[in-house]
Image (cartoon, helix red, strand yellow):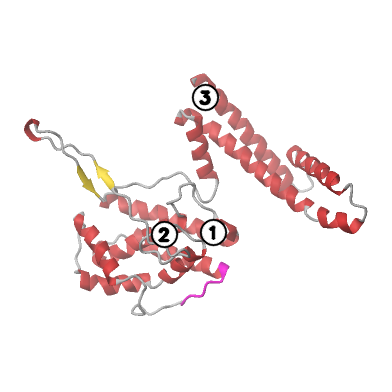
Amino acid sequence: MQAMRVIGAVLGGLIALGTSASVLQTLVTPGGRVARLFRTVDKLIDAAFRMAGHSLPHYEQRYRILAFQAPLVVAVTLISWLSAYLAAFGLLLWPATGNLAAALRESGSSLFTLGFVARSRYTITTEELPEFYRQWERWAADVAESHSSYPILLRFRSPHPKASWLLALLSVMDSAALWSAVAPDDLPVQARLCLAMGFRCLRQLANTVGIPYEDDPRPDAGIQLTREEFDEGIARLQSVDFPMTRTTDEAWPHFQGWRVNYEPIAYRLAYSIDAVPAAWSGPRRSGEPPVRPRLVINRTPDNPEGAPPTYRTRT
């Protein structure tokens, strides 16, 4: 089996090299010959269009059909390149993962902008949060470029019905805003940069799809999130002994001052793409209530002096 994985990885490398050569020859090299893949796709689609237009007696009728031929050739060629890269990198990852299906999932998640393999963690220590926010800052920058250039990406969904790229970004921004509100002196610079890039990402998407927003809203302009919802969030922080230097009453206006910058855009986008109903993300078209957060079970045995093990549950 290991020999098969190695052979598969070698084959994947050859496919990746061949696909890259095809892309370069077709799109980059000036005056170069059309690559074999493009010629093959063009011949197959041309044959299909000739069959479709063969029975049409007038040129005007054939013209209306042939107008779709060139865009279809481009689309199928791009899909063919992406499929080849998907297979190639999946085969290259096969020896490392030990499972071809898992390797293909990882390849697809890395190849496509959205990413669909779950990379979240249920527990993160305070020391790990700066690196966590740094990664999300970069991801927000990537989304700002990709989704504003190709707005159709806004409507792509995760294979998991309860996952959403928009809600993930909103939750990370809310976590940074909460930290800044309850303990501003402890907030790492990476969290501030993540918030700033999150603002920029959402506003760039709003400009693309035509969502109006205040460029410089007043911190006391008010938000749709209620004080009761905010208090529930603070209670969650208190349940895990998160260090806070401000009281709930002191933190509330500061949190509003952060959230007023991105809440209207996030809510409009969530409503527009009909994202999964979730807390702190506004209403949906269907009027469904928010899905309750998933409970994470901490299965740490507590067995003093031979007593039966017990298990603690936390959210």
Residue identified by numbered label 1: 154
Instruction: State which mark lies toward you, 2 or 3.
Output: 2
- Residue 211, above or below 236: below
Q: Mark 3, residues whose alpha carbon is within 10 Å: few (<14), some, or many (≥20)?
A: many
| Residue at figure coordinates x 41%, y 45% from the top left | 119
- Image disc number at residue 5: 3
> Which amino acid, mark 3?
Arg
Q: CA distance from mark 3 to mark 1?
A: 36 Å
Residue 90 in sight from this viewpoint:
yes
In the rendered structure, which disc, 2 or 1, sits on the residue that comes first in sequence?
1
> Which amino acid, mark 2?
Pro
Residue 248 lies, in percent from the top left, at 21, 69
Tally of numbered tags: 3
- Image disc number at residue 174: none
Q: CA distance from mark 2 to mark 1?
A: 16 Å
Verify whether residue 209 appears in magenta.
Answer: yes
Query: Circle 3 sits in a helix, a strand or a loop, which is it?
Result: helix
Q: CA distance from mark 2 to mark 3?
A: 42 Å
Residue 284 lies, in percent from the top left, at 45, 64
Residues 219 and 14: in front is 219
Q: Mark 1, residues whose alpha carbon is within 10 Å: few (<14), some, or many (≥20)?
A: some
314 vs 85, left or right, is left
| Residue at figure coordinates x 69%, y 44% from the top left | 24
| Residue at figure coordinates x 83%, y 57% from the top left | 64
Residue 283 lies, in percent from the top left, at 42, 66
The secondary structure that dominates the magenta segment is: loop
Residues 48 and 40: in front is 48
Residue identified by numbered label 2: 277
- Asked whether the beta carbons under mark 3 and mark 1 sit within 8 Å of each other, the answer is no
The residue range painted magenta reads 208-214
